[in-house]
Amino acid sequence: MPKKCYLEAGEIVGTHGVRGEVRVRPECDSPEVLAGLRKLYFDEGRRAIKVKARAHKNIALIKLEGIDTVEQAAALRGQMLYLDRGDLKLEKGQYFICDLIGLTVVDDDTGEVYGECTDVSHTGSNDVYHMRTADGKEVLMPAIPSVIRKIDVDGGEIRIFPMLGLFDDEN
């Protein structure tokens, strides 16, 4: 069962127009993701607010319910908006980072447990999964099909093929 969590949707970076619209720099994949939402949250998910959003270049322009003047909008600058992960539908093979963190990393062939996924970094070409081994060592795994064989969020595992060099040539 996926974890209930609120994800950073974007930071309010300015105002747009005089009717209370805000400019939001997305923390999610794109401004188009925000444009599809009708509700966002303040205070890490504790306070819901209805929204009308649209993508504009690399930002989202969002009208927040009850914010009707440029002064009210300007007072929100710097605040983070959150989204309920249940409001987004992911395509097959896509995962929320909050679902990956804490999964056990297991050798797909032998069943050997290597450690736990602790973070995900985004690079230009592919994501990188951070794993902490039992002895506290951090290992970086490229999130590519030849290494990451299967992700089973419900089963709590990431099954990998440990390519040469992944563990300092120990394999």
Image (tube, rainbow, N blue to C red):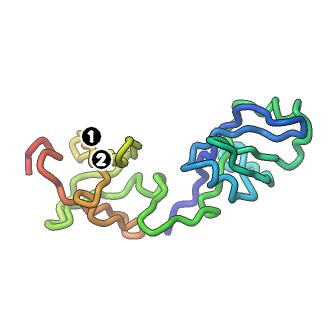
Residue 114 percent across, percent down from the top left:
22, 53
Question: What secondary structure is marked by label 2?
Answer: strand
Out of 114 and 90, give the one closest to the viewer.
Answer: 90
Locate residue 132, reporting x and y percent.
29, 45
Tell me the number on the disc at residue 88. none
Q: Quadrant of residue 68?
A: top right
Q: Is residue 47 left or right of residue 156?
A: right
Going from N to C along the chain, the mark reached first, 1 or 2, is 2
Identify the residue at horizontal 17%, vertical 55% (top origin): 162
Residues at badges 1 and 2 in contact (C-beta under 8 Å)? yes
Q: Residues within 10 Å of mark 1 (few under 14, many from 20)?
A: some
**Any mark on residue 138, and which?**
1
The residue at 86%/39% (across/down) is 20
In this rendering, the answer to whether 74 lies above or below 91 is above
Q: Residues within 10 Å of mark 2 (few under 14, many from 20)?
A: many
Residue type for callout 1: Glu
Q: Amino acid at mark 2?
A: Met
Task: Please tell me which residue is depicted at 46% across the width and 52% down the height of the picture.
Answer: 97
Q: Seen in the image, is 133 located left or right of residue 127?
A: left
Disc marking residue 131: 2
